[in-house]
Image (tube, rainbow, N blue to C red):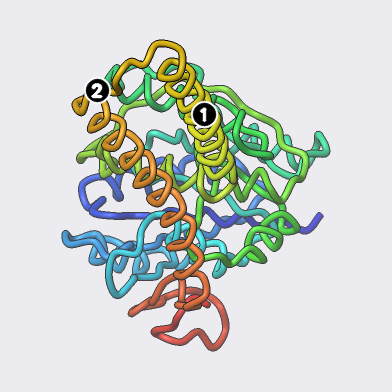
Amino acid sequence: MEKKKITAVVPCYNEEAVIGLFYKEICRVAGAMERVDFEFMFVNDGSSDGTLEKMQELRKMDKRVCFLSFSRNFGKEAAMYAGLEHATGDYVAVIDADLQHPPALLIPMFDAVTKEGYDSAAARRISRKGEPKLRSFVSRRFYRVLAKLSQIEVVEGEVDYRLMSRAMVNAVLGMSERNRFTKGIFSWVGFKTKWIPYENVERAAGKTKWSFWKLVKYSMEGIIGYSTAPLALVSFIGALFFIGAIFAILYIVVKTVLWGDPIGGWPSLACMILGVGGLQLFGMGILGQYLGKTYLEVKNRPIYVASVVETNEPGEDKAEKGE
């Protein structure tokens, strides 16, 4: 029987300390999967340490190792897209280099897509042991809010780690938007997915690249990219203020006619002006976010620019742009 091929796409940003450990572990897993050929597609996302040099060393030792190196930091979303674009496997996995995504899960993932009729097998954390409490709290709330606001399926605890069929990979690549939220894209394209639970694993080495504010920004990317609910919310609040203003005017008119009370209280008037002005700025900010995303999409800039490309694809250039 002809062997199937898995491409493991590995986004890397300043992962010099851990990339060697990851390579050893995924090679161990590849050795256990005897009926499968492997390709390791590392993507250097503009690292400032020795990540690229480590990739080059691995490439010299093992031709299964391929890599792309960006001309600057374009972000993990762009790195995942680039890896998927260059993957040649029948099945493609997206996995982090820090070993927080256990490579051993590739075995049950592969069984799910080859024996159980699934198009994708994805990992879902069932615990957040070792993670800061504030980060865990915000992450859980984000998944719940996104599930209510958007039309996509959101699974609490889901991570980017998954194995996909070639059909699903092609569907994901067909969504070439610049403002990418890959978890939303995976859900939007559909396909039958099996969720594989696992316990949270701490980084094998190095430091996390995701600060609290980066996660908040990423969360906003997901909400804006897959929901127009914030726009509807602003419209609803505006309608409530308008109705409230009508009742307030009627109250003042009736009170003046019946009792002749003077209308006083400039402090309250100032507070109302500031409140309404703040609400208007808030609404404009939300509109600006949607307009800004549209502006960036219309400019049609490449998702990434690769300065070095070393893969096993025939006729591969040394540098290219991701369209």
Q: What x and y, as percent, mark residue 118?
A: 78, 39
- What residue is drawn where x is 67% and y is 54%? 91
Front residue (pair 102, 23): 102
Front residue (pair 20, 274): 274
> Tag 1's secondary structure?
helix
Question: Visible in this render: residue 210?
Answer: yes
Q: Which mark is residue 264?
A: 2
Judged from this view, the residue extending furthest toward the left is: 49
Mark toward the viewer: 1 or 2: 2
The residue where tag 1 is placed is 143
- What residue is drawn where x is 61% and y is 32%? 154
Indicate the quadrant where residue 113 lies: top right
Judged from this view, the residue extending furthest toward the top is: 259
Indicate the quadrant where residue 319 lies: bottom left
Q: Which mark is residue 52?
A: none
Q: What x and y, as percent, mark residue 173?
A: 63, 64
- What residue is drawn where x is 68% and y is 39%? 151
